Image (cartoon, grey):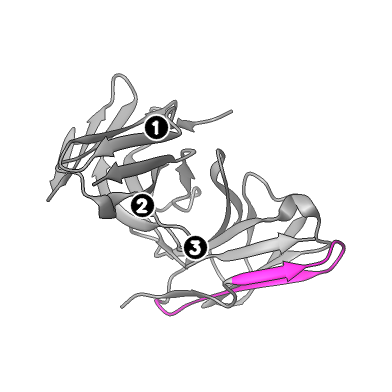
Amino acid sequence: DQQVKQNSPSLSVQEGRISILNCDYTNSMFDYFLWYKKYPAEGPTFLISISSIKDKNEDGRFTVFLNKSAKHLSLHIVPSQPGDSAVYFCAVQSNAGGTSYGKLTFGQGTILTVHP
Amino acid sequence: DVKVTQSSRYLVKRTGEKVFLECVQDMDHENMFWYRQDPGLGLRLIYFSYDVKMKEKGDIPEGYSVSREKKERFSLILESASTNQTSMYLCASRTGTTYGYTFGSGTRLTVV
């Protein structure tokens, strides 16, 4: 049973335009949400996160939106650049301590291609 | 700077071999994790460890075991490698009180 879903396997965007990556989750107990970016042959790197008490977090060109009632998370990249081309994974986490030991559950990933 | 190091970037092994994947972190993190990444399936948790000599099964532990004899080192063991274990393997670590992980660069394992 997939707890975290990224329904778009791929997204193609023109340089300078907005990229919107989406993620849906099923468990309302998740309290922290993250986006990771991954280039081929490298490990994922942390991009941006948001806690469940917020609905928006911004860091430069990257903004994450959280809609708790819809259990939906999105990442906006504005403006998109060719160097943003990578696989993007959303991830959810519950309870940094405790018995879950802060396990991250990942979505399937979305391949973003930004064309010059 | 925080580092998680995986000993091999690429490995090719034969079916039936016992395979060891090593991961070392220099951040004194309590928690360490092994994931595998496959196209269309995302990252799936194999095993994790919350302390030395402690381990917990993740979502797909079958065919794998782990060892954590020292805090900084977490090893993934494929008892008898099979072709369906061909994958990218990713190690990660975190402290017990923060969110998010630091990942290693990954090991691309091919079983032939």
Residue range of the region highlighted in magenta in the rendering: B10-27
Q: Earlier in the sequence, mark 1 or mark 3?
A: 1
On whether disc 3 and disc 2 are found on a single subunit, the reply is: yes
What whole-number distance in Å separates the C-alpha atoms at marks 2 and 1?
24 Å
Q: Amino acid at mark 1?
A: Met
Eye-nearest disc, 3 or 2: 3
Nearest the eye: A26 or A38: A38
Tell me if A101 is positioned left or right of A68 in this view.
right
Check disc 3: other Cα within 10 Å, few if <14, some if 14-19, many if 20+.
few
Which quarter of the picture shows residue B6?
A: bottom right
What whole-number distance in Å separates the C-alpha atoms at marks 3 and 2?
12 Å
Q: Main secondary structure of the magenta part?
A: strand
Q: Secondary structure at mark 2?
A: strand
Residue B41 vs B18, above or below: the answer is above
- Percent coordinates x, y for residue B69 in the rendering: 64, 77
Q: Amino acid at mark 2?
A: Lys
Residue A74 vs B84, above or below: the answer is above
Check disc 1: other Cα within 10 Å, few if <14, some if 14-19, many if 20+.
few
Q: Say which residue label 3 marks.
A: A41
Residue at 33% x, 36% y: name it. Answer: A12
